[in-house]
Amino acid sequence: MGKFQVMDHPLIQHKLTIIRNKNCGTKVFREVVNEITMLMAYDVARDMPLEDVEIETPIAKMTAKQLAGRKVAVVPILRAGIGMVDGFLQLIPAAKVGHIGMYRDEETLEPHEYFLKLPEDIGSRQVFVVDPMLATGGSAIMAIDALKKHGATNLKFVCLVAAPEGVKALQDKHPDLDIYTAALDDHLNEDGYIVPGLGDAGDRLFGTK
Ligand SMILES: O=P(O)(O)OC[C@H]1O[C@H](OP(=O)(O)OP(=O)(O)O)[C@H](O)[C@@H]1O
Ligand SMILES: O=c1cc[nH]c(=O)[nH]1
Ligand SMILES: [Mg+2]
């Protein structure tokens, strides 16, 4: 079974409260999503492999550590996942970026894929799939399905707010997947929104409503 981790560091909780507030405007929402993602990326990358490298400091020779060859890809689920890309790139600037376009039908809540463009060597990369919201889990499940179909094997899913229903569905379909969230909320409402949640992450990031 993959890992399930709620990353509830005080700085993350504080910043999450800022973006949950309905009075938070687009500019601050975007900035704070980026800050939270950076804080999460720091810890999500904790098990990246290291290797020894011989260097010289101004004082002496030493055997030091550097990240070992494994290459990274960040894959946002469009649109809202775009808000989490820079937070990863600020810490792992050499990462490649793939995109999966997905929208939820507002009536049925079924996900629909409309775009997919991945780095060619996705199969050899550590892949961080990012989307602020894990609600029914439908979008994340379909995105991970697509990534596996294209050869990805080393996958982690990173979100800001998860509903228990979505976590269960995603774990049931992809038991090997590591899931990281900044908060595990209470439930989904009848419209498929996370309660208390933060509303529609895409609309709040891009100011479309
Ligand atoms: O777990 P689910 O029930 O599938 O819901 C979560 C999805 O809903 C939102 O995207 P949305 O469909 O609103 O698209 P957008 O990012 O373009 O706004 C969110 O960013 C997730 O991708
Ligand atoms: O609460 C929710 C559920 C799905 N998508 C969102 O953006 N917010
Ligand atoms: Mg949306």
Image (tube, rainbow, N blue to C red):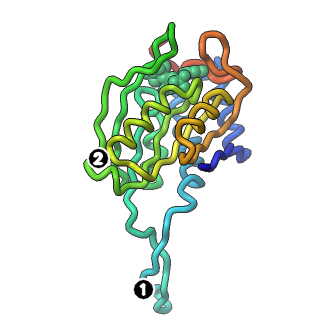
Whether residue 98 sits left or right of residue 76 in the image: it is left
Task: Report whether residue 154 is seen.
Answer: yes
Q: Which mark is in front, 2 or 1?
A: 2
Q: CA distance from mark 2 to mark 1?
A: 31 Å
Question: Is residue 3 rendered to the left or right of residue 74?
Answer: right
Residue 163 found in image quarter: top right
Find numbered disc 2 in the image and state the secondary structure of the residue it sits on: loop
Residue assigned mark 2: 119
How far from the left and from the top, in percent, is residue 185? 71, 29
Toward the bottom, the furthest residue is 60
In this rendering, would 191 be left or right of 142? right
Q: Who is closer to the viewer here, 43 or 56?
A: 43
Q: Earlier in the sequence, mark 2 or mark 1?
A: 1
Quadrant of residue 103 within the rendered picture: top left
Identify the residue at horizontal 68%, vertical 30% (top origin). Answer: 164
Kind of residue sitting beneath label 2: Pro
Residue matched to label 1: 54
Q: Residue at x 52, y 42 (%)?
A: 157
Q: Residue at x 48, y 17 (%)?
A: 110
Q: Position of residue 193 (x, y in %)?
A: 61, 17
Q: Position of residue 113 (x, y in %)?
A: 36, 24
Asked whether mark 1 lies closer than 8 Å to ligand 1, one says no
Q: Say which residue appears at 58% left-offset and 47% top-offset.
A: 40
Give the amino acid at mark 1: Glu
- The secondary element bearing badge 1 is classed as strand
Above or below 64: residue 81: above
Q: Residue furthest left?
A: 120
Question: Along the line of sight, which residue is nearer the eye, 85 or 181?
Answer: 181
Q: Nearer the viewer, residue 192 or 38?
A: 192
> Across the whole image, how many numbered discs are drawn on residues?
2
How many residues crowd around disc 1 within 10 Å: few (fewer than 14), some, or many (20 or more)? few
| 100 lies above or below 22 | below
